[in-house]
Image (tube, rainbow, N blue to C red):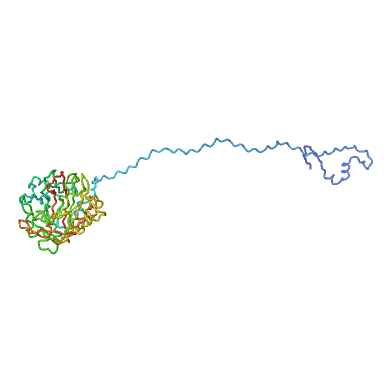
Amino acid sequence: MKQVIQKWGTVVTIISLTALFNNCGEGFKSIKGFNQQSSTGTSPAPTVVPTATPTPVPPTATPRPPTPTPVPPTATPRPPTPTPVPPTATPRPPTPTPVPPTATPRPPTPTPVPTPPPGSTGDWNERVSGPSVVWYHNFDSAAEVNAFRWTGGYRGGNDPRAIGSAYAANTHWVSSGGADGGGFLQIDRPAGSSGDGTYWNRPFSPIVGAGNGRGVDDPGASGTLTPQNFVATDGGGQLYNWGSTAKPGWYGHADYQNSFFDGTDFYLQVRVKADPVRTTVGNTQVGKLVWLSTTNNSYTAQELVTYSAFFQRPGGVGVPNFHSVYQGYNYAPLADVAVNSNEPGIQLGSELPGVCDPSNNNVGGCWSYSFGWDTLLYHVTPGHNGVADTRFEVWAAHEGDTKYVKIWDVIYPAYFDGSGNTSGAVARNGWNTLLLAIYQNGQTNSAYSHRFDQVIFSKAFIPCPR
């Protein structure tokens, strides 16, 4: 077997004879030491100079370059990451303002009907529908004014044509601008001392449609009172003679009741629009606005008259005009004869806080007209003649108010005329007519007007307009 071994770069050939190793051990030794003689005396074998076995030298490894200090691999430089910019969205066209789909055409919506103002037709109908209402006037036509125009000194007095005097036509109908926007009654007084004497004079009795100017019979407290035949004629005496008829519509104390009476106490509601020029500097106080009396005579002991004006001097256009009342007997202010006359001022028994005493510049507790369509509700509970047992109450509301405030509540002695008139009308202890008027006793004043609307006469309380 022949092996070639490469050690440290030197090739050594070793011939191995298997038999030699097995049979010639001595000879191997000679070979191992050449300075020994052969035992047989033969010529010495040539000295074999052994070749010194060189000290093994580790093989020189193929030099490798020194392992360099590892250096982190240099990354391929990248450009700096830019600050993120939000991606620009693909622009879209602006969304148009939504347009509602075109609906199937409809007929145009009618203009809304405005909410009725206070005192409107609907409210009026409710008030006059009360079971105790005897009669009413909304002045929807001139006929309601003409039917009850009365001019003093003009023959029998009735003046439906407004020809009884130079000023008769000053009591007239206005077609619009009333409390509900419709017609109303207006009475004008020209500047100076003339112009008195024509009034709207309406008996308390229910009247047939042919005579009341409305064309339908008065309700007569749900039919408990029969409408009477009163039809005014030019210069006729229908009013002056009314007290001599079978049913002249008196209201008085129960002790005086007979067939000529229609009841005891009564309520009267009237809308009034005071004129701000009535209180002009230099104009007189008092006068007549709303007037409860008799058909026998207009000027009576029992008359209850609401002043046309009561104001603090010197007055002026638009200064407060305070509600006040006097009775016919001695022409005494009601506040002076009432059982609570020890209270100062006027408007005794008022619900308003404070005192109403304009004469002493104390008006904190006074009710005055607003110069709009104010509402007055009168209630008279008749007593005995000359005895302090007649009760007089007044509630008031300014235009737009839906609640009354009581401004009068007094007990006083009423006095009743003891004689009738020349037509044979009989005097009775009570009242039986309403007059709406201007009357200034011939005194000089500036021009002004009184305006009236929505008059209701009833046996029971009448609600405040809404």
Q: Position of residue 115 (x, y in %)?
A: 24, 49
- Quick one: 264 or 102, which is closer to the camera? 264
- Quick one: 168 or 324, which is closer to the camera? 324
Q: Position of residue 424 (x, y in %)?
A: 5, 58
Q: Is residue 446 left or right of residue 13?
A: left
Task: Name the outermost residue toward the right.
Answer: 41
What's the residue at 61%, 36% (across, down)?
74
Above/below status of 195 relative to 48: below
Q: Quadrant of residue 3?
A: top right
Q: Position of residue 79 (x, y in %)?
A: 55, 35
Residue 50 visible from this viewpoint: yes
Q: Is residue 157 left or right of residue 353?
A: left
What's the residue at 8%, 45% (across, down)?
166
Residue 131 visible from this viewpoint: no
Above/below status of 113 relative to 64: below
Above/below status of 400 relative to 251: above
- Quick one: 55 or 180, which is closer to the camera? 180
What's the residue at 66%, 38% (across, down)?
70
Task: Name the outermost residue toward the bottom.
Answer: 255
Please tell me how many numbered marks the rendered image carries.
0
Q: Position of residue 439 (x, y in %)?
A: 13, 49
Quarter of the figure that contains the N terminus: top right
